[in-house]
Each structure stands twice: as C-alpha cells, then as structure tokens.
Image: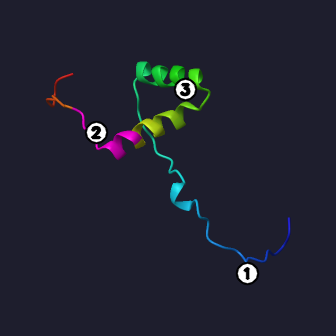
Amino acid sequence: MRKEYDFSKARNNAYARRLTKQVTLRLDAATLDYFKRLASENGIAYQTLINMYLRDCAAEGKRLKLDWHPGHV
C-alpha cells in the first residue's frame, strides 16, 4: 500500500445514488424462506430480490390494505 495517493484527477461516482444502505429488518421465517427460494430459482441473492420487490412497490405506489388493530395478533 502506498503512503500517499493522488486524487487530483478523481471524479464523482456516477453510480453513488444507487448505493445501498444497510438496515436491520425482521422478517418471519416463512417470508424469508419464500424470498430465498424464489431468489435461488432465479439465480440472484435474496437480499437483491427483496430490494427489487420493495423498489417496485415504491415506484408503483403500491399500498397494503391494512386491517390492523393494536393489541391483536
């Protein structure tokens, strides 16, 4: 490794906006198994598949029909 590097000719990363951010997400086992199985069938990582699915939901403005009542399982 060099002691110094010359970044005078460096330029901004055109793909920086597409970088991912690490988060912790809790999923039930059945949901995780579903995405792992689907990802395996398509030859991609399950994290990538989940991200693609969520990105599509966001792009399409999809919303869940929630019928959730606090305190009920």
26, 11: nearer the viewer: 11
Give how far apart the Cα atoms at labels 2 and 3 are. Answer: 22 Å
The disc at residue 16 is none
Q: Write down the residue under mark 1.
A: 8
Q: Is mark 1 on a helix, strand or loop?
A: loop
Give how far apart the Cα atoms at labels 3 and 1 are. Answer: 42 Å
- Which residue is depicted at the point 32% across and 43% down? 60
Question: For the residue carrying disc 3, how many other residues have a C-alpha within 10 Å: few (<14), some (14-19), or many (20+)?
Answer: some
The disc at residue 39 is 3
The disc at residue 62 is 2
**Which of pointers 3 and 1 lies earlier in the amino acid sequence?**
1
The colour scheme used to paint the residues is rainbow
**Which of pointers 2 and 3 lies earlier in the amino acid sequence?**
3
What range of the chain is rendered magenta? Answer: 56-64
Question: For the residue carrying disc 1, how many other residues have a C-alpha within 10 Å: few (<14), some (14-19), or many (20+)?
Answer: few
Left or right of residue 21, residue 63 in this image? left
**Amino acid at dot 2:** Lys
- Which residue is depicted at the point 73% across and 78% down? 9
- Which residue is depicted at the point 51% across and 22% down? 38
Q: In which quarter of the image is residue 73?
A: top left
Q: Is mark 2 on a helix, strand or loop?
A: loop
Q: In this view, does 43 lie above or below 8?
A: above
Q: Are marks 3 and 1 in contact (CB under 8 Å)?
A: no
Question: For the residue carrying disc 2, how many other residues have a C-alpha within 10 Å: few (<14), some (14-19), or many (20+)?
Answer: few
Residue 57 falls inside the magenta stretch: yes
Picture quarter with the N terminus: bottom right
Give how far apart the Cα atoms at labels 2 and 1 are. Answer: 45 Å
The x, y position of residue 20, in whole percent, is 52, 50
